[in-house]
Image: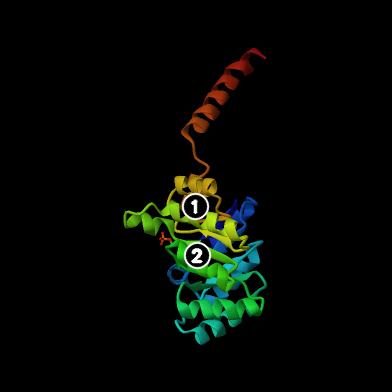
Amino acid sequence: MKFFLDTANLDEIKKVAAMGLLDGVTTNPSLIAREKGNFKDIILSICEVVPGPVNAEVVSLDAEGMIREGRDLAKLHPNIIVKIPMTKDGMVAVRKLANEKIRTNVTLIFSPSQALIAAKAGASYVSPFIGRLDDISHIGMELVEQIVAIYENYDFDTEVLAASLRHPVHVVEAALAGADIATVPAKVFDQLFLHPLTDIGIKNFLADWEKAKQTL
Ligand code: G3P
């Protein structure tokens, strides 16, 4: 499974990149709005430290505007993936950009039919939003299972990028469901490392070592 960070914060991205565990980054307008500076500059500086796809989202609602924005974003850096919302205009843009070899990620996916359409339109990635489905009392992870099954049935190349993941169990469940990618906030990434028995184990090993040293 590939790990993406769901953030536009360069410090968070640098920390995970330094561990060699970062496969890519997703941003959206809400995440960009939390950072200082110009949108394109933020995206470019992220591209400089990430050794893989960097997702940047369009804000137009009409196909023509999305295509124009998508072309502009794709020119910034070869690793840019253009995020496009799941709408009819969005799918027109996805097809057009795919024909121009510009990779897209269809975002705000909440149903398997939306994911099927996005794959047929030529999306390189789809982003089912798990936590937001959980928020309205759906079992969000069932959507990932359904999309994975559909894509396997028809050999779609579109990658399943599980998004809106809020805790480590979401990541594990997405991995079990066969998602290609999990994109997580930095806080959830840090939580993936934690287990109290690891901490206790280290503490006990070191205490025993202190005792053993005296007899060596
Ligand atoms: O990648 C999409 C993600 O940022 C949405 O997460 O927690 O706002 O639902 P959340």
**Would you call the spot at circle 1 few (<14 residues within 10 Å), some (14-19), or many (20 or more)?**
some
Q: Nearer the viewer, residue 25 or 102?
A: 102
In this picture, residue 134 sits left or right of residue 3: left
Q: Which of marks 2 and 1 precedes in the sequence?
A: 2
View extreme (bottom): residue: 64
Q: Quadrant of ligand 1?
A: bottom left
Q: What residue is shown with label 2? A: 115
Q: Which residue is mark 1?
A: 145
Which residue shows up at 57% across the image and 20% down it? 208
Furthest-left residue in view? 136
Say which element carries label 1: helix
Instruction: Provide residue 112's location: percent of width, then percent of height.
Output: 46, 61
Residue 182 appears in view:
no
Coordinates of residue 211 in the picture (x, y in percent): 58, 17
When asked about the image quadrant of residue 120, the answer is: bottom right
- Rendering coords of residue 141 (x, y %): 44, 52
Indicate the amino acid at tag 2: Ala
Q: Does residue 42 appear left or right of residue 29 in this picture? A: right
Q: What percent of the width, then of the height, locates residue 160?
A: 55, 59
